[in-house]
Amino acid sequence: MWYTKRTPVRGKDTDMTPSLSSSKLTQLQNLDAVLAREIRGQSQVLPRITSVIRRGELGLSHPLRPRGSFALLGPTGVGKTEVVLVTTHHIFGPDRLFRFDMSEYQTQESLGLLLGAKLGDVGFLGAIRERAAEGSLLFDEAEKAHPRVLDLLLQLLDAARLTVATGQTLDFSGFYVWLTSNIGSAELMSLQHSSEATLERHVLTRAQQSLRPEIFARINEKLVFHRLAYDHQLEIAEKFLARQIAFLGDRGHRLELHPDTLPFLVRKGFHPKLGARPMRDAVEKLVGDAVAECLLNGRPACGTLCVDEARDCLLVR
């Protein structure tokens, strides 16, 4: 069986503070720097994420609930999913993030996908618990889930225990629970001249109504992500471009940048509704096409990456 014994309440039995290796302590100490490097334009939420993670990893969170829980709110393409990826990879490694698109769980029958639809079936959540005792559970666009699925999330947040179709009750207290939602962000354009505090209150109120107050009450941190300023769009384009140039450099293609290249990539890769989400694809396509053109013309792709305004593309000179 892979049912995990419940941890005694701290203070009533023995010292429950975990013994952490020096490398784990270094991970926790460095988390804020890692998030600041990888997540641009959201400095208002990063310390609050770091605080919950550190308490969870140091054994200071409630033992009968998830190690930590978050509601990540705001527009699409501003870093909500990325912050979960970066945090989980840094703390647990590359294979401990388990992601659910809640648009696929809009019917009552979809509850069976999560917990098992028939006797002997453990469902997706049971399979995850069989594979791992700790990690992150990410429920994307949580507002789209069926009310019965939201009931399940409430139970998970409240007690970190779920019963699957086999009859086994599973312990998820080693996991962080992350909910994302775009609720309330569509109206932000009409409020764009309002203060940040007003915008945050609007998003939080709308999200609480949609996700239910009782769920909101059980979440450690409700975090509102802001729209990306132009300077942050440039930083994100620069990050993706640096990765792409390093990737091509490993294949013998040496590229330098013209000053106009980054603004061009922001223009092509940033979308008012999708945020920076298309940026990675735009960088890979535009830079890749410029390198491919060199190779097809029989010359090495080494030189300066410039903007060809006439053809609306990049080229290597």
Image (tube, rainbow, N blue to C red):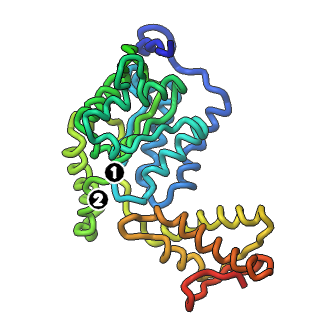
Q: What residue is rendered at 44% in x and 29% in y? A: 67
Q: Earlier in the sequence, mark 1 or mark 2?
A: 1
Say which quarter of the image contains residue 6. top left
Q: Outermost residue toward the front?
A: 118
Quadrant assignment for the C terminus: bottom right
User: Would you say the residues marked 1 and 2 are in contact, meaning their CB atoms lie under 8 Å apart?
Assistant: yes
The image shows residue 309, relative to residue 169, as above or below, that is below
Q: Alpha carbon of mark 1 to alpha carbon of mark 2: how far?
A: 8 Å
Disc 1 target residue: 73
Looking at the image, residue 128 sits to the left or right of residue 251; the answer is left
Seen from the viewer's position, the closer of residues 34 and 273 is: 273
Q: Outermost residue toward the bottom?
A: 310
Tag 1 secondary structure: strand
Q: What residue is rendered at 41% in x and 50% in y? A: 45
Disc 2 target residue: 185
Percent x, y for residue 225? Answer: 37, 55
User: Label 1 crowding class (10 Å Cα cut-off): few <14, some 14-19, many 20+?
Assistant: many
Residue type at tag 2: Ser
Percent x, y for residue 265? Answer: 54, 75
